[in-house]
Image: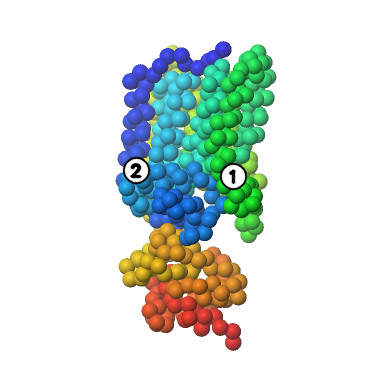
Amino acid sequence: MTDLRADRPGWKDWLPLLVVLAVFGALCFTNLGAYALMNWDESEYASLGRSMLHMDGYKISEKPNFMRPPWWPASIAAVMWAAGDETEQTAKIATVLYSLLAIALVYWGVWVECGRVPAAFAGWSLAICPEFTTRAVSLLSEQAFLALHLAALLSFYFAFRGREKWFYAGWLFWSLSFSTRYTGLLFGPLLVIIFLYESVRDRGLLKRLLRTRDFWLSPIAAGVILAPWYLRQWRSFGDPLIGVKRAAGQIPSYSNEHMPWHFYFSEMPDAMTLPIAALAVAGLLHGVAIAKRPLAVYLTVGAAIIYGWHMQYDYKEVRLAAPALPLLTMGVGLAVKAWMDFTAGRRWLGRTAVLALMAISSIQGVGAIRHEFRERQSTGETAFLQAIEHIRQSMAKDIVLVGVKQPQIYWYSDRETLRSPRRKPQYRQRLSEADWVVITSYERSPPPYLTPVFEEMKTAEWFGEGGRVFRHSGHQVLIARPEWVLDQIADD
């Protein structure tokens, strides 16, 4: 009934995984401070986590949030609570932990199918993917999502191999992934295709599963996890799907971005290194077309759905397709297994070739990762952090700020922050509610009514009572009184 390994892993089976996890963990934990939380999403997740930690509701700067699903902020809050610390480096430990989980799942999934050596290569392949590892010290939700998404896929894989209890785990992990990113809905078409595939592959097994209690009761696990959040959305905002609807229109709203359809494929060698990308594709194709491995079908369909969904949008970003990385690197394990079987009579040749490819990938991957850790800095980061530190050190806790970068200002200053509206009349009204204004010179589409302020920021040293500008590498961040800003934007 099953083609999974029946024996339990011994210490020799765990040793390669522990080595990979130790190396990866050391690399990440020593670089937790590599990036500031300048990404809009990161600051919102961090702020929500801090709000949950303080038992202050699900809010960003006193405003209830409906957009961000709750599991990732809850994970951040749990890590900060366990560490007794609320700094961004502590918050990032949550990302590292989920990244370690993803590597362990890749190793385990390949181990039960192919054994220790292919599993070790698969786990190491994921650990040295530049896109994966450099995101492991951010505070974005992709790492948590990809780990939970993979856990759900493997759980359903085991369940369809005749181990029905895994259906409960599958629905549980899916509900957590959906509570992390709304793209968890992509598991729906994946599950339909899996069901159809299994019904063709083994109708007898499918008929037995349909008669089991576990198959029908297991979705309750998802309902138990999801119900509280959607009840909260309904009671607070009148629409249980308000977050899903807003998220669905977010990427299509970036209408000024036009990227080619092949963007994700073109970026794959840089995201994974070329040898790993080549091995991954070869392993999945061999597993589907030649070895006829069900696991290869699951991985291939899962990766195809992720890439296919995100390819439809004009705006593309490598991190959006990151959930495909663990699925692809499991394909590396399948490729190594196929090569080892092919060279079984010349074992030295098979392992030497694989080790050479992995050595090249390791040099490329680690080099790219170290360069990213060492050189990456967000636009205006230094000037912004200097300005916020000035606020923290010299201004009262109960002041109200206003600025375009509302989540970042709120997270770093820990002061109530209002968002700058796009239209001038609303901006005037917002200024009347604030004590200080934070204006950054490096916005991609700055409001035109602030042009006089931007001109003043370039050279002036006086900005009204207490006003101050912070400069670094051609970028400016201004802290000024609302009255001074109103004077600058007054109509002629």
For the residues labelled 2 and 1, the Cα–Cα distance comes to 28 Å
The image's colour scheme reads rainbow
In the image, 199 versus 258, the foreground residue is: 199
Residue 461 drawn at (x, y percent): 39, 81
Residue at (53, 23) in percent of width and height: 166
Along the polypeptide, which appears first: circle 2 or circle 1? Answer: 2
Q: Which residue ends up furthest to the bottom in the rendered image?
A: 492
- Residue 81 visible to an observer of this rendering: yes
Residue at (43, 28) in percent of width and height: 107
Q: Which mark is residue 82?
A: 2
SS class, disc 2: helix
Residue at (64, 52) in percent of width and height: 238
Label 2 CA crowd tier, 10 Å (few <14, some 14–19, many 20+): few
Q: Quadrant of the C terminus?
A: bottom right
Q: Mark 1 points at which residue?
A: 231
| Kind of residue at disc 1 | Leu
Residue 388 drawn at (x, y percent): 38, 66
SS class, disc 1: helix
Q: In which quarter of the image is the N terminus?
A: top right
- Residue 247 visible to an observer of this rendering: no
Label 1 CA crowd tier, 10 Å (few <14, some 14–19, many 20+): some
Cβ–Cβ under 8 Å for marks 2 and 1: no
In the image, 244 versus 330, the foreground residue is: 244
* Callout in the foreground (2, 1): 1
Residue 232 lies left or right of residue 336; in this view the side is right
Exactly how many numbered labels are in the figure? 2
Residue at (45, 64) in percent of width and height: 416
Residue 252 drawn at (x, y percent): 65, 53
| Kind of residue at disc 2 | Ala
Residue 177 drawn at (x, y percent): 53, 38
Q: Is residue 259 above or below residue 322?
A: below
